[in-house]
Image (cartoon, helix red, strand yellow):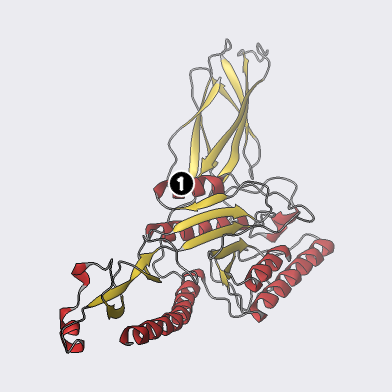
Amino acid sequence: MAAEPGPPDTAGRQSFAVTSAGPGAAVIIQATAPGHKAIAAVILTDQNPLVAVDIPLSGRAQVLNCSASAVTLDGVAQQEPEDLGSLHLTVLPKVGEMRSLPLPARLRGLTGEHTSRNPGDGGELRDVFAFQPGDQLRRIDWRTSARRSTDQDRIFVRRTFAHSEAAVHLLIDHAFDYPAQTELWFASGQPSLGEVASLHLTREAATLLASSYLAHGDRVGLNEISGLRHPLRASAGRRQLELIRTRLAILRPAARPERLSRDIPVPTGALLYVLSPFTDDEPGRLMRSWHAAGHRVIGVDTLPVLRGGSSSKAQGLAIQLCLLQRRHSLQELDRLGIPVLGWRAETPDATAADSFPGQLPLDVGLATLRGRYARANGSAAAGMRNGSAAAGMR
């Protein structure tokens, strides 16, 4: 007896064909799937019934558990029930791309698509300077040389800024997985695999950010706030994207240690993204610490838009306390000027208890931050250019 998977349909369901080669004339099939009631059916041995179950939105999950026993037509069992085992599916997060992305305060390397403040071969003019040994002949500016060198004794070259790459680090909070239906927070069984939850939104947002930056030639790394696994070092290329998607797919809810032995190390000069539902203060504490150390830190709120209620007064009070802690953490980050953008599957009601006033969606917020950071970097770059131009005139 075996349960063999078939092709998934467009409705997000997977079919399994249950086959049997037992000695009896009929087979009793029992199947259970997360979020559904157990079913049982009596079939003939030459039949191969299909069992359709939900598949996870992302990640790895158990989708089906089957057992079967062969019987004769008179109802006398000829075989003990055989456990066909649990069937698991792993669904990688979907890949997307956003074009307008903020950059860290400092770029690195001599590749990529971004104009840095480092001298080198690039496209943006840095200054015009007197020729020195080692300068390339193709960069000689003959018009400027003729205009500035009245005695024809000096040659000037055009110097540019180098193209560089950005370093981005994604930090994942997977201590909790909150379904959108608040009643499921207290359920003893596993909710339906089609239910939107915070960990799915975290995988989705992290993959979107990683694929967007990697498409521009930048380097992306991945780490967990819990510090339970070794981080993925920042790298570029298609292979890095697949490594990130695989690491995100196998993430399961895992409680953080009560107190970490040390704070999570982050690369110097990298742009940090913290993806969390922000229902406790640990992500906010780390973000405040990194912000005080001079890092650019951006939070991504992945708590789904909540709906439903609670089945008891105690559960309702627990939900209110959780949302109160969340609001306090977000307010503290907002007071320090640390942006927290929303990736919550749908537009939240501004008056709802789980919303944060003024929170921008991820795409709009990233475009706004890109303009803000570009102006800050542009002011510093302009100061460097003015200083270099003055040195060239001297």
Q: In which quarter of the view is residue 215 placed?
A: bottom left
Q: Dot 1 lies on which element?
A: helix
Question: Where's residue 235, x and y in %?
Answer: 46, 52
Question: Where's residue 30, x and y in %?
Answer: 63, 29
The foreground one among 141 and 215 is 141
Question: Where's residue 104, x and y in %?
Answer: 49, 69
Residue in view at x 24 percent, y 76 percent: 157
The foreground one among 271 and 82 is 271
The answer to whether residue 242 is above or below residue 176 is above
The residue tagged 1 is 242
**Residue 199 visible here:** yes
Residue 241 vs residue 121: left or right? right
Residue 236 vs residue 251: left or right? left
Most extreme residue toward the right is 314
Residue in view at x 43 percent, y 54 percent: 95
**Residue 116 visible here:** no
